[in-house]
Amino acid sequence: MSPNKKSNIGDTSHITYESLLEGNETFIKNALDMDPDFFNKLSVQNPPVLWIGCADSRVPANQITNTNPGEIFVHRNIANMVIHTDMNMLSVLDYAVNVLQVKHVIVTGHYGCGGVLAAMSNKEFGLIDNWLRHIKDVYRMHAKQLDAISDETERANRLVELNVIENVYNLCKTSIVQNAWKNGQDLSVHGWVYSLATGKISDMKVSTSNNDKLDNVFKFK
């Protein structure tokens, strides 16, 4: 981008069905200009990371980590949830851990998350209320801490962080992750929060590569 050219980020008026296909042609040309062997190198994927993130369009995993196609395996849903009855998430996790043999699984939330903000309200939104209830449970578990925060934005930001932390623990409780650890697999789980305002990723400092931090009732022997 030239110094005098303004970014059109945030303005979606130029996006049409046709423009997406035209953009694909531009992507192909640019990729081959940069590396004529670009697509051949993608014939086999071997990503070291599984990213469980929010479906929010402003949080693209590869772009905000400056990684290339083939380097991050991605699952996204509303508010980056790890729910034990979600067969979609579990299937992605199973494939990533047991087939791709990823080294890291990262739950990544973001400040200003619409799902978290909706869960903090008393409004009824429809079918998604059944999904948001899991975030409300996170609030319930940490209500004393959250209710002590008078500023609404700060309270929402803290719930975003706590939601990531709880979903990291949910990840550790899955049979998929615990069996990987039991079998001596090199696997670590992490929790991150991304700032839309600054582009900065914050580590929630809950990384682990074993089930030592789990309550005994959740540990598989």
Image (cartoon, helix red, strand yellow):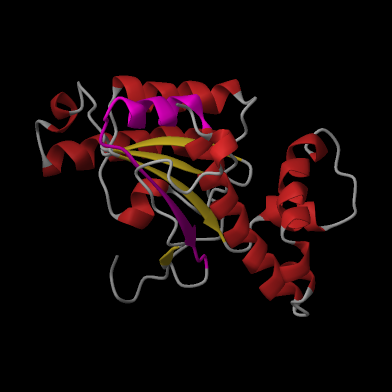
| Residue in view at x 48 percent, y 51 percent | 108
**In x, y percent, where is residue 44?**
20, 22
Left or right: where does residue 134 sit relative to residue 68? right
Q: Is there any visible trace of residue 127 in the rendered image?
A: yes
Magenta span:
174-196
Left or right: where does residue 35 sit relative to residue 43? left
Q: Within the image, what quadrant is residue 116 found in?
A: bottom right
Q: Within the image, what quadrant is residue 186 found in?
A: top left
| Residue in view at x 64 percent, y 56 percent | 113
**In x, y percent, where is residue 178?**
43, 30
State yes or no: residue 180 in magenta.
yes
The number of numbered discs placed on residues in the rendered structure image is 0
Left or right: where does residue 209 sit relative to residue 192? left
Quadrant of the drawing holding the C terminus: top left
In the rendered view, tell whether residue 81 sits above or below residue 88. below
Q: Within the image, what quadrant is residue 177 found in?
A: top left
In the rendered view, tell whether residue 79 sits above or below residue 126. below
Most distant residue in the left direction: 36
**In x, y percent, where is residue 58?**
52, 54
Q: Nearer the viewer, residue 4 or 91?
A: 91
Q: Is there any visible trace of residue 54 in the rendered image?
A: no
In the rendered view, tell whether residue 10 sits above or below residue 55. below
Left or right: where does residue 135 sit relative to residue 163? right
State yes or no: residue 186 in magenta.
yes
**In x, y percent, where is residue 95?**
38, 21
Quadrant of the drawing holding the N terminus: bottom left
Q: Nearer the viewer, residue 217 or 85?
A: 217
